[in-house]
Image: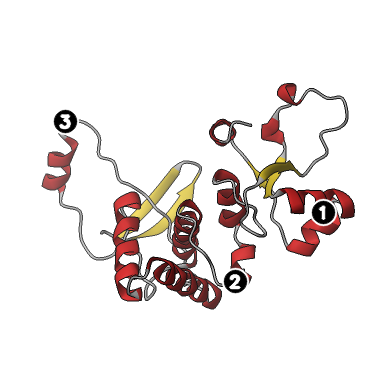
């Protein structure tokens, strides 16, 4: 992987300086094949993985290992290779940036919910992560207790309105089982979100189609 330093950025133009190598013009011409040269650009976060992120990552991997009965190191390697196959990036706790760790944890959360992996507890940083609430919606699991969920509106839809004519892309949602959905109506939406530290989610048109809203 080539690394470069951003020297200047304005509008849609960025001037880069390669850190380790010089530009090989013959190689550029070969890659261009008579056309223009392109690069895949990914801006890096100078902040490294945080303690909370590291702790949650290892906790989730440990729970996956406990659930599957596999050795933790085997599970870690499997997940790293699966992540690389899906994203093209190899994750390493030793060198990860904060943004890279956020993407990695979202991958682990998706894996946990998709395969219904039992967790020992609701970890602190889990409830600070948008991915948890998003994938709970996508996989139909209550964001509080993991039971089968309904899709709950955060903003009131209102009595007598035709839900089929509402633009749901303008609304926020949360995945709640019947028990917690009933509790939400009893104590009010603001108190409920504060009590369970819920991060409401906006869904794209494609996401809404997937969950048939």
Answer left or right for 181 relative to 140.
right
- The local secondary structure at tag 2 comes to loop
Q: Position of residue 47 (x, y in %)?
A: 49, 70
Quarter of the image for the C terminus: give it: top right
Residue 57 falls left or right of residue 70: right
Q: x, y (%) of residue 196?
A: 74, 62
Q: Earlier in the sequence, mark 2 or mark 3?
A: 3
Residue at x 35% of width, y 65% of height: 91
Q: Give 165 or 4, whichever is nearer the viewer.
A: 165
Question: How many discs appear?
Answer: 3
Name the residue beneath numbered marker 1: 183
Instruction: Nearest to the eye among marks 2 and 3: give it.
Output: 2
Give SS at disc 1. helix
Instruction: Assess whether mark 3 and mark 2 are in contact (beta carbons under 8 angstroms).
Output: no
Residue at 24%, 65% in the rendered image = 20
- Residue under circle 3? 34
Disc 2 target residue: 121
Q: CA distance from mark 2 to mark 1?
A: 21 Å
Few, some or many C-alpha atoms within 10 Å of disc 3 (few <14, some 14-19, many ≥20)? few
Q: CA distance from mark 1 to mark 3?
A: 64 Å
Task: Determine whether label 1 and label 3 are within 8 Å by CB.
Answer: no
Mark 1 closeness class: few <14, some 14–19, many ≥20 residues within 10 Å = some
Circle 1 or circle 3, nearest the eye: 1
- In the picture, the disc for residue 95 is none
- Per the image, label 3 sits on a secondary structure element best described as loop
Q: Position of residue 93 (x, y in %)?
A: 39, 73
Mark sitting earlier along the chain (1/3):
3
Q: Mark 2 to mark 3: distance in Å?
A: 57 Å
Q: Earlier in the sequence, mark 2 or mark 1?
A: 2
Classify 163 as above or below 108. above
Picture coordinates of residue 1 (x, y %)? 25, 59
Residues packed near mark 2 inside 10 Å, few (<14), some (14 to 19) or many (20 plus): few
């Amino acid at each position: 992987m080539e690394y470069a330093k951003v020297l200047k950025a304005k509008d849609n133009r960025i001037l880069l300086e390669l850190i380790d190598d010089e530009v090989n013009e013959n190689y550029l011409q070969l890659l261009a094949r008579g056309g223009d040269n392109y690069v895949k650009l990914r801006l890096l976060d100078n902040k490294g993985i945080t303690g909370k992120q590291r702790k949650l990552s290892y906790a989730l991997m440990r729970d996956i290992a406990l659930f599957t009965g596999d050795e933790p190191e085997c599970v870690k390697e499997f997940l790293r290779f699966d992540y690389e196959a899906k994203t093209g990036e190899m994750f390493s706790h030793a060198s990860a940036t904060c943004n890279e760790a956020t993407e990695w944890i979202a991958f682990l959360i998706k894996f946990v919910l998709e395969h219904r992996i039992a967790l020992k507890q609701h970890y602190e940083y889990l409830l600070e992560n948008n991915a948890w609430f998003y994938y709970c919606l996508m996989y139909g699991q209550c964001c509080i207790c993991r039971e089968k969920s309904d899709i709950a509106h955060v903003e009131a839809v209102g009595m007598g309105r035709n839900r089929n004519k509402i633009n749901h892309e303008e609304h926020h949602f949360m995945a709640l089982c019947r028990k917690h959905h009933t509790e939400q109506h009893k104590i009010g939406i603001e108190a409920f979100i504060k009590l369970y530290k819920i991060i409401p989610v906006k869904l794209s048109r494609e996401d809404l189609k997937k969950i048939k809203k």
